Image: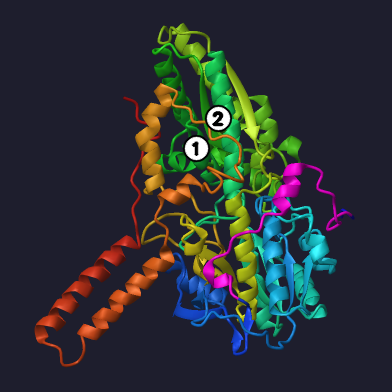
Amino acid sequence: MNADFGAPKELAGGLQQRRALYQPRLPPCLQVNLCGPQGPTVRAEYGDATTTIDPSCAHVVAQAFPNTYGQPLVSFVGPADAEAAAVEERAPIRSTSGHPICMRRTGSPSPGGHNVVWGLHDAIKAYNPKSVLYGFVGGTEGLFSNKTLEITDDVLASYKNQGGFDLLGRSIDQIRTTKQVNYAMTTCRSLNLDGLVIIGGVTSNSDAAQLAETLIQNNCQTKVVGVPVSLNGDLKNQFVETTVGFDTVCKVNSQLVSNVCLDAISAGKYYYFVRLMGRKASHVAFECALQSHPNMLILGEEVALSKLTLMEIINKICDGVQARAELGKYHGVLLIPEGLIESIPEMYALIQEINILHNNNVPVAEMPSQLSPWAAALFQFLPPFIRRELLLHQESDNSAQLSQIDTEQLLAHLVETEMIKRTKEGRYKGRKFSSVCHFFGYQARGSIPSNFDCDYAYALGRISLHMIAAGLTGYMATVANLKDPVDKWRCAAAPLTAMMSVKRHLRGPGAIPIGRPSIHPSPIDLKGKAYELLREKASSFLLDDFYRTPGGIQFEGPGSDAKPITLTIENQDYMGDIEILKECLSKVRTIVKPGCSREILKAAISSMLSVTDVLTVMSHPLNAELPLYHFK
């Protein structure tokens, strides 16, 4: 464990020093004094009980989480009278901020993570100056071994608005086994903690939900709450519009991609194959494509939905290369997500066979000989470097090391082979195909966070305190209306179980839930407005070199408040829509009362039956096949 975690450090650069002075903006409900003569001036309003994101899994989640399932939504609002008042004497709150309880995905440093700790610290001290905030050094390793660091103003001074997560560090452990849960519970009890704040993505927050349930079952007073922090942007659902760090990572990567685009058109002779971090979902690649306008983008979600084989993808890329050659263009830029290789049906099946061999402790050298005949044939077809990478030891969650599989080089190799074949057959008469490959995986993780990520993370940290003060456990801090200015943001807490589902083998009414309830990575919505925009621009991107240069992150002046394009395009005010629905239902109750006319009653019944029929059908959506590209 690094002994320097939490140590004050000198901010050497002028930009670092200037960023440390930035004071994050807060939504109105968080700007008031935390306590008044009648108690906390930030009030928690309880809404209706929740179900799961997939209603067909509700009974499974309810059985696994009997104490935390069905909890209500909670909104945080300012007081009716917001005048400042003297702070009453309150019992100290002892709370801990852990960095992501992590595996390979959520454990990665994410820009803005430090501001969650900062916001939580400021809120705790405003609530009661005697309260104490600890950080577990080294992530779950520190939680299990009770290695803590007290977070103070002096400690935070050199980490405010800074990148990385070197304040507390990270580890790759998860809280899954009985032994791990007992370690965590022992630490919570020994420190007499009122709250444990877990910062991370889908896996970390799934673990938070399980830990909250277990602590209740064992009469442990510690409240467990989660904060959505993940550079991959895949913790996205009806309550979470985006995650802390996603905006910064996409801005940095978009600048790199745009630089590559300009280099491509300047040289005029290379195709750049760029793989972007993002794990199984393609959110980072999607957002970067909208910001930089590369010639081609392959989304894992499209490939999985259309069940495109490896060679079908290669042929589509080659068709694009050939279409550009007919216009005299022998350069281009192709973006792919790192999880693409698992979206290709035959590659996914091969990876699953290899994972089974790993789980059975088969030596790596013997694995090729123990593959099924079709998997062995595919394995031998692949270039040697891909074979080696596919056999690498698994991640902590028993999945393939996607960041170590050079999918961009595989595609470039196969495209070159296909273009040579087409040349020999006389189908392609242009110049020789040449490629350059890049993987932008770690360059953006430690970047200084954007204003948006600084504000968002700081607000979530402060919300976490209000959740603990309200006695909530098994919840996630959320902010709605993120596409709007900060003064329009709405702060809330959503039950973690409401975000859970169970993986299925098949979609549709007859599908059977398989496995344990978890918060799963959210794929790109192929029916959303952002994807619709991309498809409208696809032909222009492919043929017209419509490259866009977003430049570096701006902290002041024009562009400093820019947000992810995918966030601003989609209408994601789920909490606002819930309020509209409640108003409509209230009007129905007001009009349709005992004693109303028979005509009104019949009209109400007819309308409600139609609504319930539509909602029943919509709860089992059928997916349509979508092509990868459309060429004119």
Which residue occupies 58% across, 64% down? 26
Verify whether residue 572 appears in magenta. no
Report the number of numbered marks.
2
Residue 509 is left or right of residue 367, and the answer is left
Q: Quadrant of the C terminus?
A: top left
Residue 475, given in percent of the width and then of the height, sits at: 58, 72
> Which one is nearer the viewer's eye here, 539 or 358?
539
Residue 566, given in percent of the width and then of the height, sits at: 46, 47
Residue 188, given in percent of the width and then of the height, sits at: 77, 76
Residue 362, given in percent of the width and then of the height, sits at: 73, 44
Query: What's the residue type where badge 1 is placed?
Result: Gln
Q: Which residue matches tag 1?
A: 291
Q: Which residue matches tag 2?
A: 258
Which residue occupies 46% across, 43% down? 301
Query: What's the residue type where badge 2 is placed?
Result: Ser
Residue 35 is left or right of residue 490, and the answer is right
Q: Which residues are magenta?
A: 4-32
> Which one is nearer the viewer's eye here, 449 or 216?
449
Is residue 411 depicted above or below 476 in this figure?
Answer: above
> Which one is nearer the viewer's eye here, 358 or 567?
567
> Which one is nearer the viewer's eye here, 597 or 351?
597
Marks 1 and 2 close (CB-CB < 8 Å): yes
How crowded pointer 1 is (Cα within 10 Å; few <14, some 14-19, many 20+) is rated as: many
